[in-house]
Amino acid sequence: MGGAETSRDRVLTDEELRRLWQASAPHTPLLRFLLLTGQRIGEAQRATWSHVLGDRWHIPKEHSKNHRARWVALSRQALALLHAQDASRERIFGTATDTGVQAPPLVRARADLDGIPPA
């Protein structure tokens, strides 16, 4: 799968984060959830309503890169974002595919639209 991972030192500035937050695209809720939780895109894409218990999100080991289950505390903002999603879907953010949405291309495309220089 993939190739060797490359470590990056790039950190988004406050202005870049503001611009990403203000983006309006089909996957904006997912992007905002990633910004709020700091979790991996594949974990968030596979999140179901049964994984959210109160103010915590359970990531099963099957969805985790390191194959370890864990709990993520959810802020009021993250909970509000979740509760604004379509509760009739099994997956909170719709379907989970390897190509449906990817964080780096999504962020890069939004950054390009907003004139944010590449890393």
Image (spheres, helix red, strand yellow):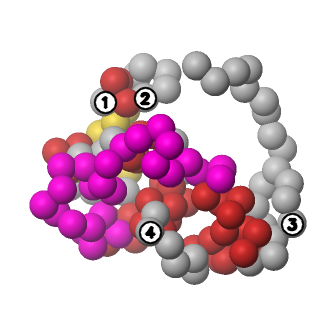
Q: Position of residue 97 (x, y in %)?
A: 41, 41
The crowding category of the residue bearing disc 1, from other C-alpha atoms within 10 Å (few below 14, some 14 to 19, many at least 20), is some
Determine which residue is flagged by label 1. Answer: 60
User: Are the residues flagged by discs 3 and 4 in contact, CB closer than 8 Å?
Assistant: no
Q: Which mark is residue 26?
A: 4
CA distance separating discs 2 and 1:
7 Å
Residue density around tag 3, few if under 14, some if 14–19, many if 20 or more, within 10 Å: few
**Is 102 a magenta residue?**
yes
Disc sitting over residue 64 in the figure: 2
Check if mark 2's residue and mark 1's residue have beta carbons within 8 Å.
yes
Q: Secondary structure at mark 1?
A: loop
Mark 4: amino acid: Pro
Question: Could you give the CA–CA distance between mark 2 and mark 4, rounded to whole angstroms?
Answer: 24 Å
Q: Earlier in the sequence, mark 4 or mark 1?
A: 4
Front position in the image: 26 or 49: 26
Q: Where is residue 102 shown, x and y percent of the image?
A: 56, 48
* Residue 117 makes an appearance in the image: yes
